[in-house]
Image (cartoon, helix red, strand yellow):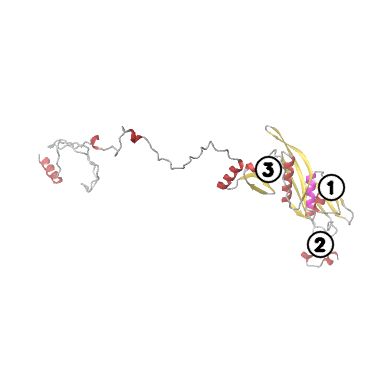
Amino acid sequence: MATASATLSSLSSLSLHTTTTTHRLSLSKPTKAFFSKPTKLPLFHTFPSHPTTTFIAKTSDIDTTFENFDPNDENDAVFNPPEAPEGFVAPPSFDDGPMETEEEIAAAYEELYGAAYSGESYLGNDIYVMDSKVRKTTGFGSKTKKEKVKDGLDERVVQVRRVTKVVKGGKQLHFRAIVVVGDKQGQVGVGVGKAKEVVTAVQKSAVNARRNIVSVPMTKYLTFPHRSEGDYGAAKVMLRPASPGTGVIAGGAVRIVLEMAGVENALGKQIGSKNALNNARATVVAVQKMRQFSDVARERGIPMEELWK
């Protein structure tokens, strides 16, 4: 009894008034804590000399209604859009309008995202245009012819051969073209290209030849300054200068390379392989070994008259 009386006297300072009536649950945050340290209190605490106190929240105490809204009223559930102004014309439906052409689609695409890479290359430069435009002019089966590039270089086809590639599904037939380009003023290049069509193969080889242009040293008599030999693979080519009026005495790919370079008097001989591509490249190697007498004298620091002493 002494312990119970001491407990009641300590709780009297909290001014805890309990009643048997039901209290409404308050969700407001307390402004001041009762204890300095957080303690876990039981949900229901029974005092020996006091009746049980229970806090119950009723559903009727929570307000879940909306202001000025009646679900049974039909006027509140119907959407009334505003009236259209005078002279308003409704836009046509997306399906009712005319179909856009490929040019309009390409223009809209380029305006939004810029030019698109078509996957085509021309003279070493990638074409950034719409695929539809390229397909019309340079695509497979197009009847329009490509305009020749006016860069001062002439083209000469050396050889066109059929090549076959054996794959898992069978054999694939392609064409290989060898083209020599030159301006007949000392510039010449040899190129090779493969494609499924002869015309496309020639165009690709011409582009490749323009990337591999070399300079041919010549005298005022349009001949070589000295002898030279070049080899490429199993092919070997021998070049000799000739007097004016001799002409180009050579055959096969060597003759075509010399004529496209502008050489008018020269002697050429193919030694070894008869492969047209290797002989043409061997001719270019032999030409690159040649040097002008003025360049040699300048490097040595002597006049040209002393070169033959």
Residue tagged 3: 137
Query: What secondary structure do most residues of the magenta stretch adopt?
Result: helix
Q: Which residue type does callout 3 highlight?
A: Thr
The crowding category of the residue bearing disc 2, from other C-alpha atoms within 10 Å (few below 14, some 14 to 19, many at least 20), is some
Which marked residue is nearer to the observer: mark 1 or mark 3?
A: 3
Q: Is residue 180 left or right of residue 26?
A: right
Asked whether 23 or 69 is in front, the reply is: 69
Q: Label 3: state its secondary structure.
A: helix
Q: Which residue type does callout 2 highlight?
A: Phe
Numbered circle sitting on residue 290: none
Residue drawn at (76%, 44%) of the image? 178
Which marked residue is nearer to the observer: mark 2 or mark 3?
A: 3
The image shows residue 45, relative to residue 213, as above or below, that is above
Residue tagged 1: 270
The crowding category of the residue bearing disc 3, from other C-alpha atoms within 10 Å (few below 14, some 14 to 19, many at least 20), is some
The crowding category of the residue bearing disc 1, from other C-alpha atoms within 10 Å (few below 14, some 14 to 19, many at least 20), is many
Residue tagged 2: 293
Asked whether 209 or 268 is in front, the reply is: 209
Q: Label 1: state its secondary structure.
A: strand
Asked whether 302 or 134 is in front, the reply is: 134
Q: Is residue 273 left or right of residue 99?
A: right
Q: CA distance from mark 2 to mark 3?
A: 49 Å
N-terminal of the pair, mark 2 or mark 3, is 3
- Where, by quadrant of the figure, is residue 243 drawn? bottom right
Residue 68: x, y in percent?
29, 39
The image shows residue 246, relative to residue 38, as above or below, that is below
N-terminal of the pair, mark 2 or mark 1, is 1
Check the image and name the residue furthest to the front: 86
Pointers 1 and 3 in contact (CB under 8 A)? Answer: no
Residue drawn at (76%, 43%) of the image? 177
Q: Which residues are magenta?
A: 276-285
